[in-house]
Amino acid sequence: MSAGEPKVSASSGGYAKGRARREQIVALAAEAYGDVGYHGASLREIAKRAGISHVGLLYYFPNREALLAAVLERRDEQDSALLAPRVSSPRAVVQHLLDLAEHNARHAGMVDLYVRLAAEAVAEDHPAHSYFVEHYASTRAYVQRALGELAEQGMLREGVDAQAAAAGFVALMDGLQVQWLTSPGEVDMAGVLRAYVQQLLREPLQ
């Protein structure tokens, strides 16, 4: 159960209704943050969009940070469904991550939300802390696994450590998002990431 999810009786059918209402709130919040940004959408505004009171919204999400974390979880699920590689291969995984960077460049509101929340969630008592711990761990493992398979196929340059390179990739991806938000016309997130990956490979990335 995620932070802020209502604990209602399953036997009465309330649990299913609560889940549906919660998902509706998350969807509307994602839409609001995409429309007006991190600071533009208050909990009261989101509650209004959902057709419930501010107190009613707090029943599902006790604070803004819990709702933001749920929005990011939803974004991850949608991105995976939309951009996941159709063919299972290390190169496809790498291309998936580059496609994701291009996708992010078309959704500034969500990138802004992610960057701001990531910085705040460093504290262990932050409602979104566990989301980011899991997010970073799974992303590093995803990249490391792909690079490890490329190494087994003899496609990585000699001396490249898959674990270190994976951590570097994730750090670069996050750092580029901050630079892009600051100077969007000067930073090509996908282009820089592609150049980084290319430095790891023996042959050009197709």
Image (cartoon, rainbow, N blue to C red):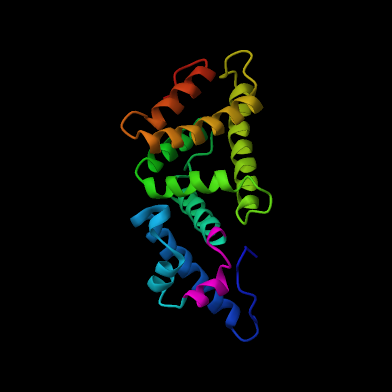
Residue 160 place in picture, x, y as percent: 62, 18
Q: Residue furthest left?
A: 185
Q: Quadrant location of residue 104?
A: top left
Q: Is residue 35 left or right of residue 8?
A: left
Q: Is residue 57 magenta?
A: yes
Q: Quadrant location of residue 32?
A: bottom left
Q: Nearer the viewer, residue 15 or 87?
A: 15
Q: Residue furthest right?
A: 124
Q: Is residue 161 magenta?
A: no
Residue 82 place in picture, x, y as percent: 43, 49
Range drawn in magenta: 54-65
Q: Quadrant of the C terminus?
A: top left
> Residue 190, relative to residue 52: is it above or below?
above
Q: Nearer the viewer, residue 150 or 105?
A: 105
Total numbered labels placed on residues in the image: 0
Report the residue at 48% width, 41% height from top: 85
Predominant SS of the magenta segment: helix
Q: Quadrant of the N terminus?
A: bottom right
Report the residue at 42% width, 53% height from top: 38
Report the residue at 37% width, 45% height from top: 108
